[in-house]
Image (cartoon, rainbow, N blue to C red):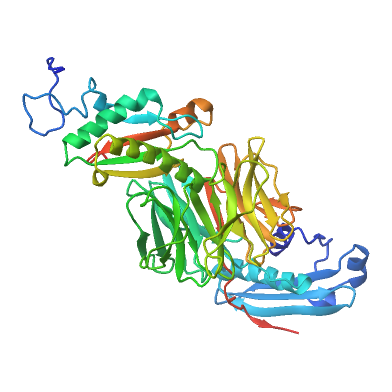
Amino acid sequence: MVAADLERTGLFRLIESLGHTPHEPEEIMYADWQNRGASALVIGSTTMLPDGRVDVRFRLMDVAKRAQVTGFAGTVSVDQLRAAAHRIADVVYEALTGDIGVFSTRIAYVMKQGNKYALQVADSDGFNPQSVIEYTEPIISPAWSPDGRKLAYVSFESKKPVVYVQTLSTRERKAVANFKGSNSAPAWSPDGSKLAVVLTMHGGSQIFLINADGSGLQRLAQSSGIDTEPSFSPDGRSIIFTSDRGGSPQIYRMAIIGAQAGVAERLTFEGNYNVSPRYSPDGKSFAYIHRHNGKFNIAVQDFARRQMQLLTDSRFDESPSFAPNGKMILYATEISGRGILSAVSSDGQTKQRLSSQTGDIREPVWGPLLKSQRIGNFVN
Amino acid sequence: MGGGSGGMGTQDGMGSGGFAMSPLRDPSNILSQRSVYFDFDSYTIRNQYRELVLAHAKYLRDNSNARVLLQGNTDERGSREYNLALGQRRADSVKNAMLLSGASDHQIEAVSLGEEKPRAVGHDESSWIENRRADILYQGEY
């Protein structure tokens, strides 16, 4: 699992151990590993304890220096083993790249099986799925609250789209936007206090701001066309969104605070269908869906350079969403009529299919980085 | 007219014995037609559906207690949220035509199902044509 996590980033080349697998530093044949091109080595062990729990030990070694970089030891229950492995991968990733590891984060998506729709939450590798809710009516547009405790989504259970917010731990849920007409496209403000939503109560699809408890409705913009799919900038001062005000669906940016509030600026110009924009966590670029030659692919654009970079070449991709460290993009791609969870590094170099579950997976969204639950103590 | 041929009992249990069935369900009445189809990427009501929309508008005008839900739909290609907005335009088109022909705003709710509730589930043009549609549902039918 640790190896699979690291490999998915495209930043590591894995070297299998031949025959002898070292568990402790004194067992390492450094010269062998050096000859085979290894610059770092992960060693460790898991031991089942009499009480049914598991002792987990791990060390990251620098092969050239023949010294430990980091490591930890601790005791976990069996159902925490996956979490422990993701945590080890995070520690290795952080030590070797200097970036934040995101393997311990969670993802959400909609799974369709037969005529059932389930909103599910899973580990970042797509394993360990758990249903938040299940319905026989469609669910779309899941969105994580910034604290990772809630999901907003759109349900069609009342024969029209209504925006709900559900608390994961209690399963308590509330319709926060249920106005006349359609209610959709929820996006959380970075401080979690508000949601941008798309309402049609005044005619047309237009973007509004509403408190996360459903109070305090406020219109954000007014256009004669469709405005939808809002995404907040990390500083909460602007949104990017899809609009067809110029004749075809394109991506626009608009400040929502300050002197320029309400003035929209077009960002995409290539092709006649650019939709589903998402800010990167550092606010310097955005991911979106670009249609060309009948295909729908993941693209990214840097706000400064203004150049589109296509990351995928499949037939139908949807819902790009950045990892909290900005290094990977989660999306769904259609293979044989069903959606498959996929990830691409944000430079487009590495693509991976995540766990191949049996249903049709739609609209995956990467959850936030949470204060990591440390497992065990660091050892030297 | 009447269509009172034998065997046409009222199935709706409304106890309107002896009368013809509700015009909304009488197959010979244009009001029983509930679907308006659209061209690709379009929300303009085609001429062939003008009469149907007008008939429903008049029914709403003459029956002030009647309420309708207009559900717009799209084919499956593209972003789900953008398709939801396109389906809304189709429902809004039908709503606006009804308002111009005498129906009242409070009688009509226009919503969208986008690509989420396809009537035809194939992945080809013949299915897509079927799904570029707005449906007219009266209270009690949804």
The residue drawn where x is 39% and y is 24% is B47
The residue drawn where x is 16% and y is 37% is B63
Residue B5, picture quadrant: top left
Split into 4 quadrants, where in the image is the N terminus of chain A? bottom right
Residue B58, picture quadrant: top left
Examine the rendered structure and indicate whether residue A157 appears above or below residue B136.
below
Foreground of the two, A179 or A223 = A223
B102 left or right of B40? left
Q: Residue furthest front?
A: A259
Foreground of the two, B63 or A260 = A260
A211 left or right of A103? left
Split into 4 quadrants, where in the image is the C terminus of chain A? bottom right
Residue B60 at x, y = what percent? 21, 36
Let me know if residue A367 appears in the view: no
The residue drawn where x is 49% and y is 51% is A227
Examine the rendered structure and indicate whether residue A269 appears above or below residue A305.
above
